[in-house]
Amino acid sequence: MTEPDRQQAAIDKVFMRQALDFAARGLGTTGTNPCVGAIVTQDTADGPVVVARGHTQPGGRPHGEANAFARAVSPVAGGTLYVTLEPCAHRSIRGATPCVELTLLSGVRRVVSAMEDPNPHISGLSHALLRTAGIAVTTGVLEDQARHAHRGYLSRITRGRPMVTFKVARTADGYAGGPGGERIAVSCPAASGWVHLQRAHHDGIMLGIGSVLTDDPLLTVRLPGMAQRSPIRIVLDSHLRLPLASQLVKTAGEVPVWVIATEAAPVERETALVAAGVEVMRVSADAHGHLDLGEALQLLGTRGLTRVFSEGGPTVAEKLAIVGLLDEVIVSTSPNALGRPGIVAVRPPLAALLADGDVYARVETGFIGLDRFEHFVRTG
């Protein structure tokens, strides 16, 4: 690689990183569409400067490129477009102009794309169209980071289900709850705030009925000015035991509540929940009469969900991990001990999988406030 090529590669990484950072602003708001970041630069005597930036807007439209072109502060013709995912090439049912056409019409001379879109309607087509039109195309810039950013979308496209992240907080001696499921304060305020931000970055929050019956949680985003970012609340409830008096049901008209049950769950319970504003969906039961988790996640994928944040407790996490449906695990550990036996936060089967480097890799450790965080990603 020549020195000018090395310099250009370094510049490309700088602006692609900015595009990825800008895209992160819309996580959890774009529905079935990936949250794409786009930046346009123009060369000047002092080096390239940003003249436009955008990301996919709430609901999934307009896309990142369209948003950037519409918000440009000066002409983009002759500039370079940095985009975190290959531009779309097909028209939606709403008739929006594909981003590859908008890019061609914009007059940019070069496109730098982080990765090819695995969607079979697009996969490589837009890059080929741009090259055919005489636009220089560079791909694969910060591809690993882009795959991480778009991992929910990639999971839905390639596996038919959303990615699932399990978050659990535990005391210094390893407990998530007190004796008999007694609710205890585990996380410090800074860590609690971080959890609410993660909720806002996901399409759904999922938990098992056991956690609902024990804690009666609200599961909304309670950060200043972000209440509208509360995602869909999903309850795994094989036999439809969700109480009508629970906080979830009472607020179903404000933030959606989806309940997934088995086909054998009582019809009268479904009728009562639906009348209260809850949406009930049914899937097959496994050999033990519990709902089929794989089928449940596939169902969520058909409903457009790409990122699910599971706060469903140790039982749900263990089951998801054992059947290979738990993509990421975040464990936060308080410096404070419970000092007596309680509900174990990470049960032995899940602990063994996290310790097995061939199944999960520890990708990050650090502190948020007083709590130590460990982030694991499934390798297979």
Image (cartoon, rainbow, N blue to C red):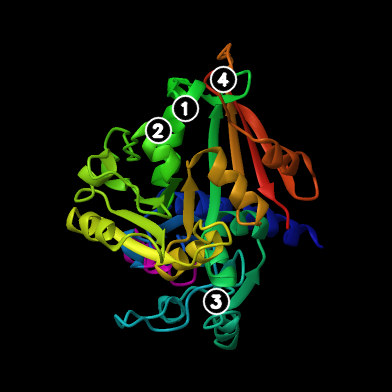
- Contact flag, marks 1 and 2 (Cβ < 8 Å): yes
Q: Amino acid at mark 1?
A: Gly
Labels 3 and 4: the sequence-earlier one: 3
Mark 3 to mark 2: distance in Å? 41 Å
Residue identified by numbered label 4: 334
Q: Is residue 260 above or below residue 357?
A: below
Q: Picture coordinates of residue 48 (x, y %)?
A: 54, 55
* Separation (CA) of disc 4 from disc 1: 18 Å
What secondary structure is found at the residue carrying circle 1? helix
Q: What residue sits right under mark 1 in the picture?
A: 181
Quarter of the view holding residue 227: top left
Position above or below: 123 against 289:
below
Q: Are marks 4 and 1 in contact (CB under 8 Å)?
A: no
Q: Which residue is mark 3?
A: 119
Q: CA distance from mark 1 to mark 3?
A: 44 Å
**Residue type pointed to by label 3:** Asn
First of labels 4, 1 by sequence position: 1
Q: Measured from the top left, where is residue 184 in percent x and y?
A: 45, 21
Task: Give the class, few, some or many, for how many residues have Cα within 10 Å of label 1's Cα (few <14, many ≥20).
Answer: some
- The residue tagged 2 is 214
Residue drawn 44% across the image and 40% down it: 210
Q: Amino acid at mark 2?
A: Thr
Quadrant containing the C terminus is bottom right
Magenta stretch: give its range.
63-79
Looking at the image, residue 50 sits to the left or right of residue 148; the answer is: left
Element at label 4: loop
Q: Earlier in the sequence, mark 3 or mark 2?
A: 3
Q: Residue at x 70, y 55 (%)?
A: 7
Q: Nearer the viewer, mark 1 or mark 3?
A: 1
